[in-house]
Image: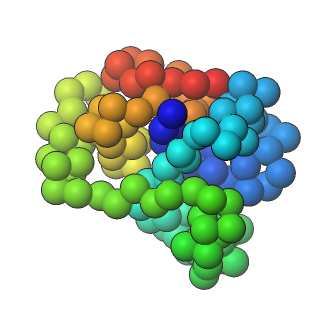
Amino acid sequence: MKVLLDTHVLLWWLDGGSKLSRRARNVIQNQETTVLVSAVSAWEIAIKSEGGKLEAGPLVADFHGELEREGFAELPISSHHAIRAGLLKGPHRDPFDRMLIAQAHAENVPMISKDRLFDDYGVRRIW
């Protein structure tokens, strides 16, 4: 099984996982699961860190190393993803969420997220 992590799920996992649901933790911990982390999460974390909304300097400085230590795979942003995100219908304007929605659809993978907003866009969500 492959899954895509929402940015908050990645941050909560790296912080020990106590804010995650039992189901989310189990899926991430399962050796059979390929955990994908979008490049958009790195972008979101860096922007929020630089803007003072998030203390994540060490994570930003060693994002790839952190993914490697966790055994997570990076999901790059392709032009296919970008076009799909740009063409999404609906009122949601958050560019990070739009990209995650587009990637989940394009890659045909469920997302681990607490955010029910993704349900409105037909994303298979695990929580």
Number of numbered labels in the structure image: 0
- Residue 120: % across, % down: 38, 18
Q: Nearer the viewer, residue 87 or 62?
A: 62
Side of 79 where 123 appears, left or right: right
Q: Is residue 51 above or below residue 76?
A: below
Q: Residue furthest bottom?
A: 61
Give the quarter of the figure containing the C terminus.
Answer: top right
- Residue 61: % across, % down: 60, 81
Q: Is residue 38 above or below residue 50?
A: above
Side of 84 where 59 appears, left or right: right
- Residue 123: % across, % down: 39, 24
Would residue 94 be visible to someone looking at this image?
no
Q: Is residue 89 above or below residue 72?
A: above
Q: Quadrant of residue 85?
A: top left
Give the residue drawn at x 55%, y 73%.
64
**Colouring style:** rainbow
Side of 76 where 18 appears, left or right: right
Give the residue drawn at x 68%, y 67%.
69
Q: Is residue 1 above or below residue 48?
A: above
Q: Quadrant of residue 29?
A: top right
Give the residue drawn at x 35%, y 19%.
122
Give the residue drawn at x 74%, y 36%.
25
Would residue 9 be visible to someone looking at this image?
yes
